[in-house]
Image (spheres, grey):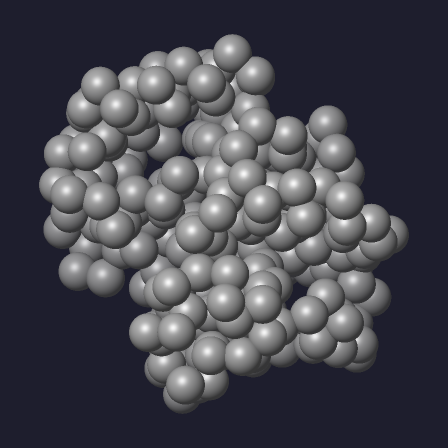
Amino acid sequence: MIIDTHFHIWDKNDARWILNSPARLQKNFSFDDYLKEFQDYDFLGGIYVEINADNIELESLKMLNFKHKKLLALCLATVGGSSFREVLHTKNSGYCLSSDFKKTINLVNENKLLFEVCINEKELNNFCKIAKEFKSGIIFNHFANIKNFNEIDSLKQIAKNEQVYMKLSAQDDFILGQDYSKLLEMAFNIFGEDRICFGSNYPVSELKPSQWIKQISNYFKNDALKEKIFYLNAKRIYKEKL
């Protein structure tokens, strides 16, 4: 069984960045398109993640009104989902230490939401200084976008909190033929078997969900561990919705 903790769908005019993205992303992606990627699996459903839309209120309203048995939960840029995300990797260095971001922390805590962290590796040291302020837990997207492994100590420090999790979600630039074992090893060593979970990052990552599933399955040999990664841990982390 599989739960995907990280997917996107959109109309291509929902966000300016889409029109400046690689040509393969400059089109509409529907929920039906998404489901086709998992047609060969025992797929329980996925968690929609906000897309840094031009109009976040409109995006949230659209997704809150979208109903499907395989849409399991929402990660929105407004209150109303099971988790909250404010994209940080496009912000200036040090933004997470600002008074503006403090407002985000307060909003997340007031609504008892899980905070989803999409951040640049170089900002982990700054984020480490305020991570403990989130009261309902945080979950890193895309291996914290780590590429050079220069901020592992900051990530280890943050991960000492048992309410900090890591999505094994494909980074935007993952491609077929590359080996991402080092990132899988890092996530397992830092977060352990109970605080990691599968995410496809469909359709942003060039890796198809099936290709990423295969690489994870080939790296983690133990069936009980794979059951945690692909299903059980997601149910526990997003327990109020799944």
Residue 187 lies, in percent from the top left, at 40, 50
Examine the rendered structure and indicate whether residue 187 appears above or below residue 179: above
Up-down relation of residue 7 to residue 26 (above or below): above
Task: Report the residue at 86% width, 52% height from top.
Answer: 69
Q: Quadrant of residue 4?
A: bottom right
Q: Which residue is painted at 19% across and 33% down in the image? A: 95
User: Horizontally, is 121 left or right of 88 in the view?
Assistant: left
For the image shown, how many numbered marks are present on the structure?
A: 0
For the point 50% across and 67% down, the residue is 13
Res. 54 in view: yes
The N terminus is located in which quarter? Answer: bottom right
Q: Which residue is nearer to you in this view: 73 or 239?
A: 73
Q: Quadrant of residue 191?
A: top left
Q: Nearer the viewer, residue 241 or 219?
A: 241
Give whichever of 226, 112 is nearer the camera. Answer: 112
Q: Position of residue 110 (x, y in %)?
A: 51, 11
Give the residue furthest to the right: 69
Q: Position of residue 30 (x, y in %)?
A: 69, 70
* Position above or below: 202 against 139: below
38 left or right of 161 in image: right
